[in-house]
Amino acid sequence: MTSHPSASVPLAVVTGGSGALGTAIRSRLTESGWRVIATYRTRRPEPAHSVGHTTWVRFDAADGTSTEALREAVTAQPGRLHAVFACVGAPSSKRPVAETPLSEFTAVHEANALSLVSTWHAVADRARRDSTAVLAVGSDAGQATRANNGPYSAAKAALESLVTTLAKEEHEHGVRVNLIAPSLIDSPLAAHVMALKGVTDPVEYFARLPWGRPLVLDEVAAACIELATAAHWSYVTGQIYPLGALR
Ligand SMILES: NC(=O)c1ccc[n+]([C@@H]2O[C@H](COP(=O)([O-])OP(=O)(O)OC[C@H]3O[C@@H](n4cnc5c(N)ncnc54)[C@H](OP(=O)(O)O)[C@@H]3O)[C@@H](O)[C@H]2O)c1
């Protein structure tokens, strides 16, 4: 683990920091001089892919000991915890509910919704002290319920409910909690999901999206960081922001 001793450098937690969006958020933050505590579950990125001051913690939503490890990592860092970016997520297998095992519902719920609960258990004390902004990454699937995506849609809907609940519970501590719900992002996860859906022509699939293209990781990362950290968003809490989808 590497850490930066300066308390004046802003600090953020990025859960799911090893994923595609987590990497984009982490890179933008560290390039701007932030210290980042980032989590991975199965694949810890090589040092070459960790620019700036990144402290890596293994974090699994289903494992209480890793919640404690995240708490310890946050406690060990000086200065103010400005922001928490909750980027953990996992897709469904794209089958109808009738053919989806209960264990998949449990695992997908754990990754997409309960990961925010574990994260909050790890950071709540510090976040209350520091009036931290929490930005959870949902999905347009949380509201645009589609056939053959039951576990994911249900989990992202639950995540939205958790975000608005937390915003109300933590408002008195100056903590803000919001959610950005992107539509398809050009990413390995999207490629995996398209393969599960049997998409053979991604270009044609992308052309049918509202803007004729998927979102780009860096533009989603920029929106997440702006919403969590820009002074002109400092009055916003308990909000769900769709990104890219037509409602
Ligand atoms: N990509 C898209 O098109 C898209 C669109 C809308 C919303 N989203 C949402 O955006 C977020 C980031 O997506 P992404 O494309 O960056 O996905 P990704 O590359 O698959 O990254 C997912 C991250 O979550 C971690 N993770 C998975 N299950 C976990 C668990 N049970 N406990 C703890 N960590 C776990 C992964 O860790 P390891 O890899 O180390 O195991 C990884 O860091 C997700 O919430 C996703 O649902 C994505």
Image: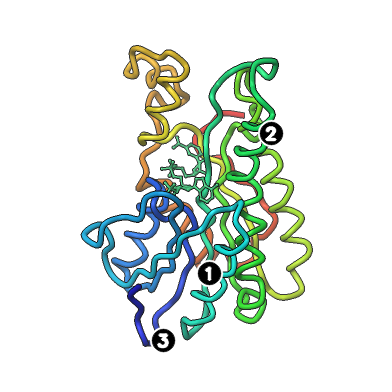
Residue 191 image offset from top left, x and y in percent: 37, 27
Question: Which amino acid type is marked by label 1?
Answer: Ala
Residue 117 image offset from top left, x and y in percent: 67, 57
How far apart in space, not on screen, are marks 2 and 3 (Cα)?
Answer: 40 Å
Within 10 angstroms of label 3, few (less than 14), some, or many (20 or more) residues? few
Disc 2 secondary structure class: helix
Rendered image: mark on residue 154: 2
Q: Which of marks 2 and 3 is nearer the N terminus?
A: 3
Q: Earlier in the sequence, mark 2 or mark 1?
A: 1
How far apart in space, not on screen, are marks 2 and 1 (Cα)?
Answer: 28 Å
In this rendering, the label closer to the viewer, 1 or 3: 1
Query: Is 180 situated above or below 229?
Result: above
- From the viewer's side, name the closer residue of 207 and 63: 63
Question: Which amino acid type is marked by label 2?
Answer: Ala
Query: Is 167 situated above or below 110?
Result: below
Disc 3 secondary structure class: loop
Residue, disc 3: 8
Q: Residue at x 67, y 52 (%)?
A: 239
Asked if disc 1 is less than 8 Å from ligand 1, the answer is no
Within 10 angstroms of label 1, few (less than 14), some, or many (20 or more) residues? some
Disc 1 secondary structure class: helix
**Image quarter hosting the C terminus:** top right
Residue 74 image offset from top left, x and y in percent: 52, 75
Residue, disc 1: 69
